[in-house]
Amino acid sequence: MKAISGTNLEQAKSHNRRVVIEAVRTHGSLSRAAIARMTALTPQTVSNIVEELERSQLLVAAAAQKLARGQPIIPYSINPHGAYSIGLELGRRRASGVLTDLSGAVCARIEHLVEHPDPQRAMPALQTIVEDLQEAFAFDRNRLLGIGIALPGRYADGGTTSLSPHSLPGWQDFPVGHALEQRVGVPVLVENDATAAAIGERLHGVARGLGSFVYLFLAGGGGIGAGMFLDGHLYKGSRNNAGEIGHIIVEPHGRLCSCGKRGCLDRYISPSVAYEFMGIANASELSPDNLDALIAERGEGADAWLDQAIEPLRQTLDFLELAFDPQTIVLGGSVSTSLMRRLAERLEPLHDPIDPDRKRTIPRVMIGMTGKDTAILGAAALPIFSETNPRFDVLQKPVG
């Protein structure tokens, strides 16, 4: 049994710094007094942190505002140009990269075709994209926080693939993060696409400021995953594999799944199943506009998919609410935006909540980022999240 110890002063200082950044990021422009009230930190602690963040250009001060009584106040906000990050994504035929600022705005974008993207072909392409992104936009390279990569599948410590995705053969046990870091000399973070998208949604999307939510990620190439924030923590499980929601059995003895079980959620609401119903064989190779046009043309197939998908999805949402009690469940992913909207429109009526009399200020289900940029913007959010999100784990460390 592990005991719980306290933390040292340096870890507490780092945590408090992140808490201040999170308060300003979530609530917008704030004065030092407002930050102190929101964070329960002393005015002197807040003053020291704000001065340090202003020197490092992560916060920027606005003009002083004169109040009716008392001293003028100075509001502080996140400086979009205070830091940058790079997000990378690898598909079956292309590698893509974006450079974003601290607000999540895309400053540059590059895409390369990569046929049969095994590590030997893909790693040089990813390196070239990183180098070209840094040339495509003028910024202080010292302000590049790092690189994030979003890939389908599971990852061991250090960004080593522990399960090769079906869509990207050849990556079993490959140290993605370490290999790219050696090539580009910049810190690299690797995350599965569902978790990366959830992080992006919390930093820049509809889940901004929420402490507990589940992000249900529908991957355009097929498969379903979940990213979970619980009480402000990114929950990844004991082996970093939480969120394999696509392999919950929703139909006993149902359709055979690639995992070997029958009746998995993946086999009913996965976008790849939707495209099967519509007879679209090359969805991953089509532009978003062309894919949406095909979906509109093949409405009968889309309706047939929706008819068999809705109840398994309702059942899954019910399970997620009962198991995790989130503030909301966010539907998103690299699936076609038009298809996601049709799916969300058919959801009502949801199963009755366990507390039907509770007043809600947030919808039970929300639509988050959708479309081909969802995972890559989530990847770009990884270094920003790592640098700025409060880390409660450093305040309590296990003793052996």
Image (cartoon, grey):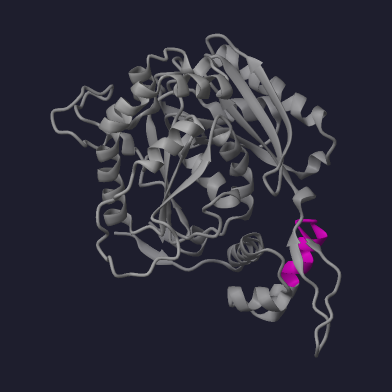
Quadrant location, the C terminus: bottom left
**Exactly how many numbered labels are in the figure?**
0
Q: Is residue 210 above or below residue 173?
A: below
Q: Picture coordinates of residue 317 (x, y %)?
A: 31, 47
Secondary structure mostly taken by the magenta-highlighted segment of the chain: helix
Q: Picture coordinates of residue 242 (x, y %)?
A: 36, 43
Residue 293 inside the magenta-drawn segment: no
Q: Picture coordinates of residue 169 (x, y %)?
A: 44, 15
Residue drawn at point x = 64 percent, y = 30 percent:
181
Residue drawn at point x = 57 percent, y = 27 percent:
89
Q: Nearer the viewer, residue 137 or 288?
A: 288
50 on left or right of 124: right
Quadrant location, the N terminus: bottom left
Q: Is residue 196 above or below residue 394?
A: above
Where on the picture, by quarter, is residue 61? bottom right
283 on left or right of 78: left
Q: Nearer the viewer, residue 228 or 250?
A: 250
Farthest residue to the top: give it. Answer: 115
Farthest residue to the bottom: give it. Answer: 69
243 on left or right of 117: left
Residue 142 visible in the shown view: yes
Residue drawn at point x = 44 percent, y = 66 percent:
5
Q: Picture coordinates of residue 355 (x, y %)?
A: 27, 66
Residue drawn at point x = 58 percent, y = 55 percent:
389
Q: Nearer the viewer, residue 55 or 29?
A: 29
Q: Which residues are magenta?
A: 48-59
Where on the picture, by quarter, is residue 327? bottom left
Q: Is residue 105 above or below residue 70?
A: above
Residue 156 visible in the shown view: no
